Image: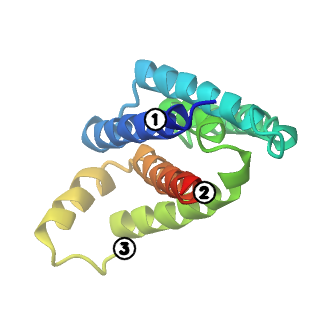
Amino acid sequence: MSPIFAILVPIAAIALLIRIGLRDLKIQKIANNDVLALGLLGIANTYLFFQQPDLAAAAWFGPAAGLALFVVLFAAWMAGLIGAGDIKLLAIIPLVVGAHYLMLFGLLFLVLVAVNVFVLKGTILDGISQIQRYVEFFGGRGIIPFGVPISAAAIVVLVMQISTMLMISL
């Protein structure tokens, strides 16, 4: 497998995650086309894991985790706790980041969600005008755009993957 392809897949996923995060921040929508494109990149990334003999056994964990997340979060969507776009995005992320980086993604995601909720509901950053407008817009409506921390955590993990691949190839 070409090492260029192994680096281009995460780079394309990062670009798409930036688009998804910004769109969710602006209009609180995660487009189905973006999730589909990210899913295709996730399938390509999973294929790359299967091509590495030492990672192939664990490569099934990514798709299984995505399916499990979808089933559990679907119930949360039915209860009105989370948006459908967030569920689709979270179900695809295990394919994109891979099984070996899923724990790191989960930890980063939890930290970023906590920061996001604290900014929306907390009072420590009230003096900063840009953040104040952010809090007023989202906090007053009771909406928390989870696509932003999902995308940010996945981007950090993908950058780490790329840097690891580059260090190994040098």
Asked which quadrant contains residue 33, the reply is top left
Disc marking residue 168: 2
Is 60 left or right of 85, judged from the image as shown? right
**Dot 3 or dot 2, earlier in sequence:** 3
Residue 117 percent location from the top left of the image: 43, 63
C-alpha span from label 3 to label 2:
43 Å
**Which residue is at 50% across, 28% downward?**
38
Which amino acid lies under the numbered mark 1 shown in the image of this protein? Leu
**Which residue is at 88% across, 40% downward?**
57
Disc marking residue 8: 1
Residue 142 to residue 83: above or below: below
C-alpha span from label 3 to label 1:
39 Å
Residue 64 percent location from the top left of the image: 80, 34
Asked which quadrant contains residue 78, the reply is top right
Classify mark 2: helix, strand or loop: helix
Residue 48 percent location from the top left of the image: 67, 33
Asked which quadrant contains residue 30, the reply is top left
C-alpha span from label 1 to label 2:
16 Å
